[in-house]
Amino acid sequence: MAVVVPLHRKKPKRRRAKLTDPVVRAMHEGERIYDGIIGGLYAQCGKRGITFRVIADLPTRAWKQRLDGPQTLERSIGDFPGMSAKRARIEGARVIALIKS
């Protein structure tokens, strides 16, 4: 008989701050910092580095057309230091606007 062992994943530490290069550079693994200027933009630090991501709700008409489709989309837009925090804010605003339209 197999024994089922529950996996306990740690939730990432979350906080809100203006994303700047020094703030992003000081992140620790498992930390997530939401941007204080652009809602839905955040930086997440994992084992392989820091990634800028966006999360936004789809318009109602979009997810109702696909009966059981997702209501929220989450996308990666770039990695640090290849993309600066300032550039991530510009790109994040553009991607969020595309998702919501």
Image (spheres, grey):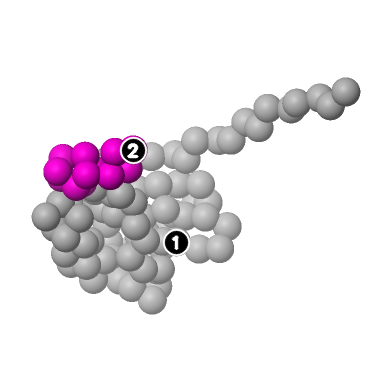
For the point 36% across and 68% down, the residue is 78
Bounds of the magenta segment: 57-69
Q: Quadrant of the N terminus?
A: top right
From the top left corner, tell me how far across and down residue 38 is, in percent.
17, 52
Residue neighbourhood size for the residue with mark 1, other residues' Cα within 10 Å, grouped as few (<14), some (14–19), many (≥20): many
Whether residue 39 sits left or right of residue 5 in the image: it is: left
Q: Which residue is mark 2?
A: 68
Is residue 101 rendered to the left or right of residue 75?
A: left
Q: Quadrant of residue 13?
A: top left
Label 2: how many residues lie within 10 Å, few (<14), some (14-19) or many (20+)?
few
Q: Secondary structure at mark 2?
A: loop
Estimate the spatial distance between the alpha carbons at disc 1 and disc 2, rounded to whole Å: 32 Å
How many marks overall? 2
Instruction: Name the foreground residue: 35 vs 95.
Output: 95
Hey, which quadrant is residue 84 in on the image?
A: bottom left
Q: Residue at x 45, y 61 (%)?
A: 50
- Tell me: residue 1, above or below residue 60: above
Q: Is residue 61 magenta?
A: yes
Question: What residue type is disc 1 on?
Answer: Ile
Helix or strand or loop: what does disc 1 sit on? strand
Q: Is residue 19 left or right of residue 78?
A: left
The picture places residue 35, in percent across and down from the top left corner, at 24, 50
How far across and how far down the image is residue 91, in percent?
22, 67
